[in-house]
Amino acid sequence: MRRTSLAILGRLTPAGIQEIAEICAAKLGWTPTRVEEEKARSFRILQDELGITFNQSK
């Protein structure tokens, strides 16, 4: 996600990250726990490397 043009251009949203994670989960057999871990990792990387932050509250 972080290397896509969506992230680089600032068009990646929390909903988009969720959708991508669900697609990955289906293809890679991720558990719900793994999905949450991967999403959290993506948010951290986007913030640390690209300075992109999101309000992740539900």
Image: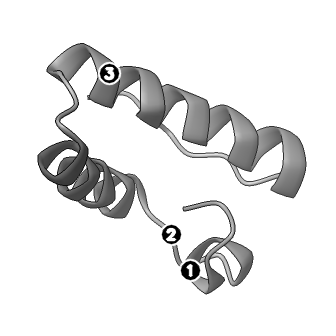
Write the residue at 73% across / 54% down.
52
Q: CA distance from mark 1 to mark 3?
A: 23 Å
Q: Callout 3: helix, strand or loop?
A: helix
In the picture of the structure, the residue carrying the numbered disc 2 is 12
In the picture of the structure, the residue carrying the numbered disc 3 is 34
Say whether disc 2 or disc 1 marks the residue closer to the N-terminus: 1
Name the amino acid, label 3.
Answer: Arg
Residue 6: x and y, percent? Answer: 56, 80
Name the amino acid, label 2.
Answer: Leu
Q: Nearer the viewer, residue 21 or 12?
A: 21
Res. 15 image quadrant: bottom left
Q: Nearer the viewer, residue 32 or 27?
A: 27
User: Compared to 9, does 41 lie above or below?
Assistant: above
Residue 55: x and y, percent? Answer: 50, 39
Is residue 1 left or right of 47 when viewed as pictured? left
Say whether disc 3 or disc 2 marks the residue closer to the N-terminus: 2
Res. 35 image quadrant: top left
Q: Are marks 2 and 1 in contact (CB under 8 Å)?
A: yes
Q: Quadrant of the C terminus?
A: top left
Name the amino acid, label 1.
Answer: Leu
Q: Callout 2: helix, strand or loop?
A: loop
Is residue 45 left or right of 6 when viewed as pictured? right
In the picture of the structure, the residue carrying the numbered disc 1 is 6
Mark 2, other Cα within 10 Å: few <14 / some 14–19 / many ≥20: some
Residue 27: x and y, percent? Answer: 18, 53
Write the residue at 17% across / 22% down.
32
Q: Nearer the viewer, mark 1 or mark 3?
A: 3
Is residue 26 left or right of 36 when viewed as pictured? left
Q: Quadrant of the N terminus?
A: bottom right
Instruction: State the residue lying farthest toward the front.
Output: 28
